[in-house]
Amino acid sequence: MIIFQGVSKSYKNNGHASTALDNINFKINPKEFISLVGKSGAGKSTIIKLIIGEERPTKGRIIFGSYDVTRLKSNELYKMRRHIGTIFQDFKLLTEKTAFENVAFALEAAGSPQSDIAELVPKALEMVGLSNKADNFPREMSGGEKQRVAIARAMINNPDVIIADEPTGNLDPINTAEIINLLLKINELGTTIILATHNKDIINHINRRVISMESGQIVRDEEQGKYILF
Amino acid sequence: MITTIVRITKYGWQNFTRNAWLSTATIAVMVLALSVFLGLMMFNVMTGTIISSIENKINISVYFKASTAEDDILNVQSQLKSLPEVAVVDYVSKDQALAAFEDKHQNDPTISQAIDQLGSNPLLASLNVRAYRPNQYQVIADYLNNNSSIQPFVEKISYAQNAGIIDRLNRILDIARRGGIGLTVFMSLVAMLITFNTIRLAIYSNRESITIMRLVGGSNFFVRGQFLVEGALYGILSALVSMLLIAPIVYFISPYGTILVPEMNVWQYFVSHSLLLFFYGLLFGVALGLISSFIAVGKYLRESQA
């Protein structure tokens, strides 16, 4: 479903090239729950940015379903992104839209009929426990609530994959547990989950496939992995 | 497609109303720019009226010797009419000249008595020649001075006496005309730059939203469309407010303009052309709003994708 073939990514800063990813190869199968772990700067976020087409690789090829991400034109990216739900540490909610509107936006952008939106959005908000916050703006919500809105938005399109980049980075332990449980639940319903984190407790708790990274390289890829400090 | 356009319009309106302070600030700056634009249009009308009023006052008068027969004068009139530079040639007979003179000085008994004492009409018949453009008078004057069939009848030509003034007026009118065009172009450019920058700043504050919208599957058209609607709304409201702002100003200054040039009524012009002026303002505002939004959003659309 997602294939990285010899992917490298380097950035040029003041004429000096710095390598963010070096010859990355892996494959993610449908319905997997996979954790990308490693210290800050290990290359987790770069992998995520490459999957969603926010960055392009310097070398190699990335396949997502029927899309060759490396060959997609920038004005075609949205078609692929409608198959992906994204969750970020800083929530990335539209500040001038209510929780309902934030979730509905993904459906409206995809051209879903109004009747579907009226039916699906309340269900998604109910699933993340925010039915009573539908008309609240992000500024009126706590960090945990904002992240749950982001999860509702990520899953509303019934995507093939949900990518979560440090989704619990700004949350307390209770909210962290709730968010991870929600992701596990969504995975059980058949959606592939890619979780990038450096939270050791989460990784050891969920006991799923772990890809460990260090200095832009994959150092370990285990089916039921643990977070091992380097 | 219709659903998408309805949604784009809804979001554009939502952005506009929910960022009320930003919208107000943007519109305020655009109103100033548009007022300058509309003000310049009014200014051009005023200077145009003043210029044509002055132009209408310039003419060449050819005075004929007292012995000249009316047929000869009418013959000169038809010769002059055939010149391409000549717009109008009015014949003023001796009697008409006297009647006009008496009419003009009817309240001055000394002059009336002097005329009566003379016993005969001392005034000369004349042709008042008006050219299409002020700079054509020299050509007409040259024609009159160099034409041997006309010269024997001519007593004097007023142009020779007024040539200096006419020439100076010509230059002033030319500078006024060129200055008006230059000022309009310059101020319109300034207004355009200010508007563009204001909208660019308004969209800059939405750059994060643009990135998010694209991340959650919004196409370039879907994202950009909202900001185009918002830009058009800025233009429409700015045009409306500018007209409301200019109306009382024009009403106030109009009487002063009439004192300067009696045939100039700026308020009347404003009222009779208000729809056209509003249309120009709307065109300027909406076009600028759309173009500025298009360019500014494009920058962030490019930045939010690899």
Image: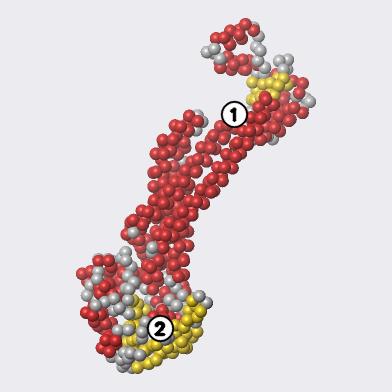
- Count every numbered label the image shows and give the total: 2
Query: In the figure, is residue A184 to the left or right of B27?
Result: left
- Give the answer, above or below, for where A22 lies relative to B194: below
What percent of the width, then of the height, locates residue B68? 73, 17
What percent of the width, then of the height, locates residue B272? 45, 38
Q: Nearer the viewer, residue A167 or A134?
A: A167
> Disc 2 residue type?
Gly
Q: Secondary structure at mark 2?
A: loop
Contact, CB < 8 Å: mark 2 with mark 1?
no
Label of residue A43 in the image: 2
Query: In the figure, is residue A125 to the left or right of B33?
Result: left
Q: Secondary structure at mark 1?
A: helix
Query: In the figure, is residue B20 to the left or right of B54?
Result: left
Q: What residue does disc 1 label?
A: B57
Instruction: Give the number of the mark in front: 2 or 1.
Output: 2
In the picture, residue A136 is in which quadrant?
A: bottom left
> Disc 1 residue type?
Lys
Q: Residue at x 56, y 17 (%)?
A: B104
